[in-house]
């Protein structure tokens, strides 16, 4: 299955040498992690996520035939290498300190 996924992914991307696919098996099923060059992420995802969605559908169908649960995950190195910045906590249910006037409500 890994070879088939690799062949499909390499046919979609420009930087074929940067395609890495790892396989992780657990009690739930098999998860394939795909890592491609950052410039090729859009080619794998497709417009509105249609390409990756289609790949996942095909793999689920193949998994049903073999009686196994198959998942496909993309690894985005651009976000993985960035440090997360601390965010300011904003209270969700805090009432405003001043009443809202009728003019502000219509704006």
Image (cartoon, helix red, strand yellow):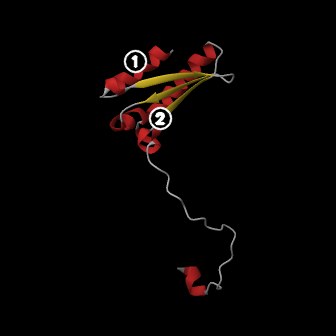
Instruction: Look at the numbered discs 1 and 2 and tell me whether their residues touch, using CB distance below 8 Å.
Output: no
Mark 1 or 2: the one toward you: 2
Quadrant of the image occupied by residue 35: top left
Instruction: Say few, some or many: other residues with alpha carbon within 10 Å of mark 2 (under 14 / 14 to 19 / 20 or more).
Output: some
The residue carrying mark 1 is: 7
Q: Is 77 positioned to the left or the right of 64 in the image? A: left
The residue carrying mark 2 is: 75
Instruction: Say few, some or many: other residues with alpha carbon within 10 Å of mark 1 (under 14 / 14 to 19 / 20 or more).
Output: few
**Residue at figure coordinates x 36%, y 38% from the top left:** 38
What x and y, as percent, mark residue 9? 40, 24
Quadrant of the image occupied by residue 65: top right
Above or below for 58 versus 83: above
Quadrant of the image occupied by residue 88: bottom right
SS class, disc 2: strand
What x and y, as percent, mark residue 70? 59, 23
SS class, disc 1: helix
Alpha-carbon span between mark 1 and mark 2: 18 Å
Q: Is 70 positioned to the left or the right of 83 in the image? A: right
């Amino acid at each position: 299955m890994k070879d088939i996924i690799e062949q499909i992914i390499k046919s979609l991307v420009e930087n074929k040498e940067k395609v890495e696919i790892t396989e992780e098996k657990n009690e739930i099923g098999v998860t394939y992690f795909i890592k491609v060059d950052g410039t090729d992420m859009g080619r794998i995802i497709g417009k509105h996520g249609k390409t990756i969605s289609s790949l996942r559908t095909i793999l689920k169908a193949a998994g049903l035939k073999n009686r196994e649960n198959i998942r496909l995950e993309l690894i985005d190195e651009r976000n993985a290498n960035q440090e997360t910045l601390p965010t300011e906590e904003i209270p969700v249910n805090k009432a405003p300190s001043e009443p809202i006037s009728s003019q502000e409500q219509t704006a």
